[in-house]
Amino acid sequence: MAAPPTVAAPPEAARSALLDAIATELPRLKVLTDEGDRESYRLDETAYLEAGLPLAVALPTETAEVATLVRLAAEHRIPVVPRGAGSGLSGGAAGIEGGLTIAFTQMTRILEIDHENLCVVTQPGIINADLKKAVAEEGLFYAPDPASYEMCSIGGNLGTNAGGLCCVKYGQTRDSVLGLEVVLADGSVIRTGGKNVKDVAGYALTHLFVGSQGTLGLITEATLRLRVAPPARSTLLAFFPSLDTSGDAVARLTASGIGLVTFELMDKPTIAAVDDWHHLGLDRDAEAMLLIESDLPPAAAAEELARAVAECEAAGASSTLLAQDPQEADWLRQARRLALRALERLGTVRMEDVGVPRSRVPELLRAIDDIARRHSVRCATFGHAGDGNLHPNFIFDHDDPRAEELTEATRAELYRAAIELGGTVTAEHGIGTSRREFLELQRGAGAVGVMRAIKTALDPLGILNPGRVV
Ligand SMILES: Cc1cc2nc3c(=O)[nH]c(=O)nc-3n(C[C@H](O)[C@H](O)[C@H](O)COP(=O)(O)OP(=O)(O)OC[C@H]3O[C@@H](n4cnc5c(N)ncnc54)[C@H](O)[C@@H]3O)c2cc1C
């Protein structure tokens, strides 16, 4: 199966014809065409990737407008980039030269909170934290919580199948999605599911669109699974004298089957960067730290964390510490969420995202250390250890002329190491543009051929986020 058609930068005539058609058919739609405005939609958070300047940025408020925009873009063969909050880390929402970016920032309405069926129906532009807050006010809980939850949108979470700090118990975004409304590449609109928690009618289209990074359709509405809000979390920190002992603790805790809700790792450079910024009094002599949480009722949580302490000590923890109260627990969790921003104070950070089967976390930690040493590059690692998902961050001085070359070399070695360990080149950030050349290495030509066949069937003109994923 050949690669789907790529869309060359559209000719000037097609660009102005599209803008005229939009103005005629959607006269009330907000469309940004000023160069300064468009510039701010060129990049996502993957700032080192090259990206194009969009022809225009449309800000629809409802599905019908999105459908018309996509139909017009198809008629004029103009590439379409769906965009949430632009916090992605694989270039998925970055601009395409002369393309139409459809930003969902005005589609933020919650359409229904359904207590009886424990679900919420929402537009995609709402920020994850705002959705969580709205349902929490009604005693309910939306589980997916990327570390970026205060800035990223539900549509972006669906686009990337985002992970986060409680996947270890509640799964990735995909595990909380019951149904979607999707605008297809010709502007038609389909529904893939709804409020049924069991529904096996036909192919699982909902799960096909989740994680497809805007290459198969634009999500305009989502029905998401809620839970009754769990009790406040009980929080444990465990410090380790070596990366090996922390990795062993990850493997032991996984095998123990304890149902932790948070299970995060930070290495020594990350501990120092976070502590320099937030002054939490962390053990800076430790080589690694695990942040471990339970969301069971207090007595059961105490029992769960006591078992976790025993596993950490058996792996060689140098000390363990329980958060004294919910406020201290919030600070610690927030500090972990801000780990990337803490590291960015040290230089230019290239954040990576690899995953391995959880028993192989110790080997992955050693492989990361080895790559950083051989290239003499500073590296700080944190991540969702309970999912086997680590984020090594290669850090360069702002004016380091070797930064680009070393970024390429370290990334390539890291991805190969993850694959050799039976892992993945991306556990939650997505292939986007940044990891495309490694997709086939991991999945094999046969599987990528199937992906391309799906892409070609759903988007024969290749206008939906071309050049991303496959
Ligand atoms: C500090 C920091 C911490 C982070 N922590 C995490 C983390 O813990 N876990 C994690 O998974 N990620 C994390 N990320 C990455 C990022 O926040 C997630 O990938 C998030 O899901 C992106 O959401 P967004 O709204 O910013 O989407 P965008 O970046 O705008 O888009 C992401 C992708 O989704 C597509 N898309 C957006 N909206 C739609 C739609 N309506 N329909 C179809 N496709 C759409 C886009 O085309 C693009 O391919 C982090 C990023 C930062 C900067």
Image (tube, grey):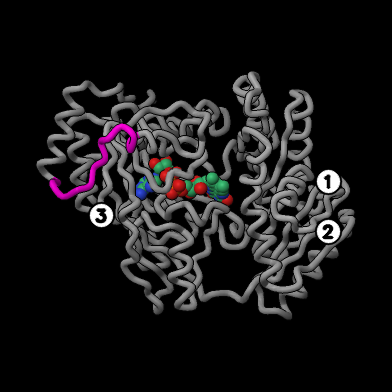
Question: Disc 1 marks which amino acid?
Answer: Glu
In this rendering, the answer to whether 370 lies above or below 327 is above
Question: Disc 2 marks which amino acid?
Answer: Cys
Residue, disc 1: 287
Alpha-carbon span between mark 1 and mark 3: 49 Å
Residue drawn at x 45%, y 71% is: 135
Verify whether residue 316 appears in magenta: no
Residue 210 shows in this picture: no
Callout 1: helix, strand or loop? loop
In this rendering, the answer to whether 2 lies above or below 318 is above
Task: Estimate the x, y position of residue 211 in percent, counting from the top left.
Answer: 45, 46
Pick whichever, 275 or 84, lies toward us: 275
Magenta part of the chain: 26-38
Q: Is residue 58 left or right of residue 305?
A: left
Dot label at residue 61:
3
Task: Estimate the x, y position of residue 441 in percent, counting from the top left.
Answer: 57, 28
Discs 3/2, front: 3
Image quadrant where one finds the C terminus? top left
Image quadrant where one finds the N terminus? top left
Task: Estimate the x, y position of residue 281 in percent, counting from the top left.
Answer: 79, 58
Dot label at residue 312:
2
